[in-house]
Amino acid sequence: MARAKYQVLVIPYVQTADGVLYCIFRRSDMEDCWQFVAGGGEEEDGTPEVSAQREAFEEAGIPVDAPFTRLETTSSISTEHFPKARLHWGEICLVIPEYCFAVELPHKNIRLSDEHTRFAWVDYHTAMARLQYDSNKVALWELDNKIKMGTASL
């Protein structure tokens, strides 16, 4: 599959009797780096939404028919992180957009891929303290506030 010119970020969450928990993932290729599900779009996906569903399934076993919600948060990712894809996109492609999504799960069942060594269901403050990337923190802030306002699924 050819790499599309965008990245996706997916925040799995579950609402429990004790409050909302977010699933964060520890990357296998970076020491002590926690993030949400993140990955590249594929041209065959057609849309960022389909890419988000595919990545969530590949990395965490989340069903593609789960209720995904597109967030307003977007970021720009430097293409220095994608040297092979840059050959396809051209050397003047310096940044690509990252589209953010949330997916509410009815349970905490996650199937971990080789891209991660661990996952943890944590509260908002713990997630904010552990997350490596600002784009993940901004998307989490947006989602947490939408949940509090009752607009997370809109």
Image (cartoon, helix red, strand yellow):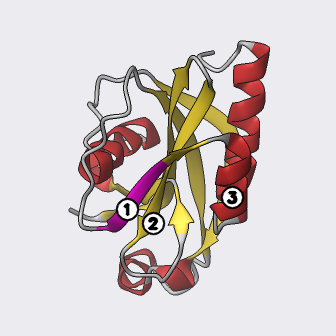
Asked if the residue at tag 1 contacts the one at tag 2, i.e. Cβ–Cβ closer than 8 Å, the answer is yes
**Image: 82 above or below 131:** below
Residue 108: give x, y in percent of width and height. Answer: 38, 33
Query: The disc labelled 1 sits on which kind of residue?
Result: Arg
Please name the residue that numbered disc 3 is placed on. Answer: 135
Label 3 SS: helix
Residue 60 is one of the magenta-drawn residues? no
- Distance between mark 3 and mark 2 Cα atoms: 16 Å
- Distance between mark 2 and mark 1 Cα atoms: 5 Å
Left or right, 8 with respect to 94, comes to left
Residue 42: give x, y in percent of width and height. Answer: 32, 56
Query: The disc labelled 2 sits on which kind of residue?
Result: Arg
Please name the residue that numbered disc 1 is placed on. Answer: 118
Asked if the residue at tag 2 contacts the one at tag 3, i.e. Cβ–Cβ closer than 8 Å, the answer is no
Q: Nearer the viewer, residue 147 or 5?
A: 147
Mark sitting on residue 26: 2
